Amino acid sequence: MDEQAWPEVYAYLREREQPTETYVEATRRIRLDGGAEVETLVFLSDTAHPQWAGALSLERQAELISGATGLSGPNIDYLRDLVAHLEAEGIRDAGMEALLARVEAISA
């Protein structure tokens, strides 16, 4: 990324990811496909935040997601998009796939 674009990109990410300050910003090193390591910005769940749900059963997660709408629209759409993007990258997340299946069953 062009370093001059960083302030604008960072502002966009903060606006998108932190509307209610539910995450802790951190940096982590990751390895790219080519083997290069880079420093990245990540948003980690803040377990001390009042909106932290803690450990919920799959059923309870599905119930909450199926009836919820956030700033960006219905939560089921966000979950579908997440699963689709992971699959597009060749990543299978059985937990997210099971959650999506349960949410879709509730929403049907």
Image: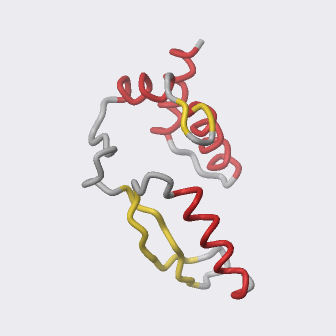
Q: Is residue 33 above or below residue 16?
A: below
Q: Residue at x 60, y 12 (%)?
A: 108
The N terminus: image quadrant:
bottom right
Q: Is residue 2 above or below residue 17?
A: below
**Quarter holding residue 60:** top left
Q: How many marks?
A: 0
Residue 49 x, y percent position in the rendering: 29, 52
Residue 58 x, y percent position in the rendering: 37, 29
Q: Residue at x 64, y 79 (%)?
A: 7
Q: Residue at x 49, y 58 (%)?
A: 18
In the shown orientation, is residue 97 left or right of residue 6? Answer: left
Q: Nearer the viewer, residue 67 or 83?
A: 67
Residue 20 x, y percent position in the rendering: 44, 52
In the shown orientation, is residue 89 left or right of residue 38? Answer: right
In the shown orientation, is residue 59 left or right of residue 84? Answer: left
Residue 55 x, y percent position in the rendering: 27, 39
In the shown orientation, is residue 55 left or right of residue 24? Answer: left
Residue at the extreme bottom of the image, as rendered:
3
**Quarter holding residue 51:** top left
Q: Nearer the viewer, residue 83 or 44?
A: 44
Q: How is the image coloured?
A: secondary structure
Q: Is residue 13 above or below residue 37?
A: above
Q: Is residue 63 above or below residue 20?
A: above
Residue at the extreme top of the image, as rendered:
108
Q: Nearer the viewer, residue 51 or 28?
A: 51
Q: Residue at x 52, y 76 (%)?
A: 30
